């Protein structure tokens, strides 16, 4: 198994998609990239910790490649909006790819260049070495699956999942 660490707005959205990807063992919501150790959701939401809401993706590279993980990433958020995704605003919602090794860094650089060809505005996604990952509180894990009719889930997350299903049908987990 290998790991990827990305952020693209609210972690509920990113986690909900990656938990549906064939080859992904698990996607965990959490925080990374800030200065406070073991931050709480409230602390991260304040914007004072420097952490981003991120998702740690544990995947089987025999089933899905790191490049495919990144292709999905570009499709499920807007990497051209600085510190914002939709109505979610603040540095905690920044677009970020954290890499664990030089191979991931090189693949991410190539992926950013390829993705830029599809976006009219400049991509502002941060690319940095993976910092310590702090798993978010239990009530954030599998949030969409636990609360599919909740307003935010219905209005924001469901369309991202639908877009993923439409564009990446061959990558959807088979039950």
Image (cartoon, grey):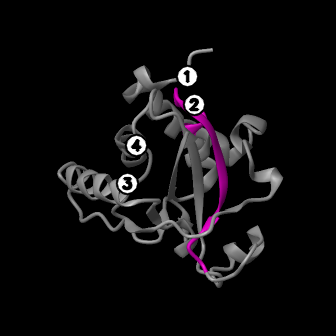
First in sequence: mark 4 or mark 3? 4
Are circles 4 and 2 on residues that touch, CB within 8 Å? no
Extreme-right residue of the structure: 138
Q: Is residue 24 magenta?
A: yes
Residue visible at 51% across and 59% down in the picture: 7
Q: Which residue is mark 2?
A: 20
Q: Nearer the viewer, mark 4 or mark 1?
A: 4
The residue lying toward the viewer, choosing from 73 and 22, is: 22
First in sequence: mark 4 or mark 1? 4
Q: Which residue is mark 3?
A: 104
What kind of element bears circle 4? helix
Position in image of residue 42 (x %, y %): 76, 73
Are circles 2 and 1 on residues that touch, CB within 8 Å? yes
Q: Is residue 67 visible?
A: yes
Q: Nearer the viewer, mark 4 or mark 2?
A: 4
Disc 4 and disc 1: Cα gap in Å? 17 Å
Q: Which residue is mark 1?
A: 173
Magenta stretch, residue numbers:
17-34
Q: Nearer the viewer, mark 3 or mark 2?
A: 3
First in sequence: mark 4 or mark 2? 2
81 horizontally vs 135: left or right: left
What kind of element bears circle 2? loop
Disc 3 and disc 2: Cα gap in Å? 22 Å
Quadrant holding the C terminus: top right
Mark drawn on residue 66: 4
Looking at the image, residue 117 lies above or below residue 102: above
Disc 2 and disc 1: Cα gap in Å? 6 Å
Residue visible at 66% across and 43% down in the picture: 153
């Amino acid at each position: 198994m290998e790991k990827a660490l990305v952020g693209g707005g609210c972690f509920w959205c990113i986690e909900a998609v990656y938990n549906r990807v064939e080859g992904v063992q698990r996607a965990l919501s959490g925080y990374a990239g800030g200065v406070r150790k073991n931050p709480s959701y409230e602390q991260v939401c304040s914007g004072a910790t420097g952490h981003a809401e991120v998702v740690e993706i544990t995947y089987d590279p025999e089933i899905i490649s790191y490049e495919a993980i990144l292709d999905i990433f570009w499709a499920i958020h807007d990497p051209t909006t600085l510190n914002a995704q939709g109505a979610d605003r603040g540095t905690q919602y920044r677009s970020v790819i954290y890499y664990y090794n030089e191979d991931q860094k090189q693949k991410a650089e190539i992926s950013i260049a390829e993705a830029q060809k599809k976006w009219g505005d400049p991509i502002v996604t941060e690319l940095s070495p993976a910092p310590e990952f702090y798993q978010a509180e239990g009530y954030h894990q599998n949030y969409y699956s636990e609360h599919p009719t909740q307003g935010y889930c219905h209005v924001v997350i469901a369309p991202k999942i639908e877009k993923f299903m439409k564009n990446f049908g061959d990558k959807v987990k088979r039950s």
